[in-house]
Amino acid sequence: QVQLVESGGGLVQPGGSLRLSCAASGSNFGSYAMGWYRQAPGKQRELVAEITLGGRTNYADSVKGRFAISGDNAKNTLYLQMNSLKPEDTAVYYCKLQQWGPIRRTSWGQGTQVTVSS
């Protein structure tokens, strides 16, 4: 069983920064990839940034140059550094862990609210 716990959300003014964390716990994850998604009210959940199985990072066009995803394998923690935040970044941010082997399983965190407003 995998557990993901996000933290670091909150209220920030436009132009500000936040750093989200996702702590993963559980048994051996095997081969896996991790990413951050977000869901704004009335919208579908969308990919924000991910670290693929091969270690490549991908970003949504809307956050390129402003957000940075990173991971600390020793701490089993995924981070999302968010700079130059905009009101349109307001959403619930979710952490996802995709296991590819020896078992295939998708796990989600409970989400953390990010609100960008003056």
Image (cartoon, grey):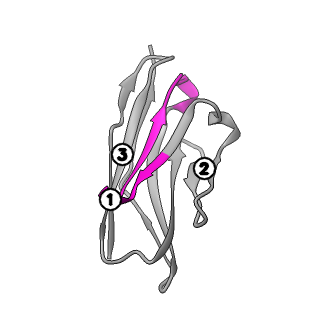
- Name the element at disc 3: strand
Count of picture labels: 3
Q: Residues within 10 Å of mark 1 (few under 14, many from 20)?
A: few
Q: Which of 35 and 76 is in front in this view?
A: 76
Sequence-wise, the earlier of marks 3 and 1 is 3
Per the model, the C-alpha gap separating discs 3 and 2 is 18 Å
Label 3 neighbourhood size at 10 Å, few (<14), some (14-19), many (20+)? Answer: many
Q: Residue at x 54, y 32 (%)?
A: 89
Q: Given the image, on which type of amino acid does mark 1 rest? A: Ala
Q: Give me the C-alpha separation between circle 3 and circle 1.
A: 14 Å
- Camera-near label (3 vs 1) is 1
Looking at marks 1 and 2 on the same chain, the residue that comes earlier in the sequence is marked by 2
Disc 1 + disc 2, Cβ < 8 Å: no
Asked whether residue 7 appears in the rendered view, the answer is yes
Q: Which of marks 3 and 2 is in front?
A: 3
Which disc number belongs to residue 46? 2
Please identify the residue farthest to the top as the structure is shown.
Answer: 118
**Residue type for callout 3:** Ser
Quadrant of the snapshot with the C terminus: top left
Task: Tell us which disc is closer to us: 1 or 2.
Answer: 1
Q: Which amino acid does the dot numbered 2 rest on?
A: Glu
* Magenta region: 70-89
Q: Name the residue under label 3.
A: 21
Q: Is 82 one of the magenta-colored residues?
A: yes
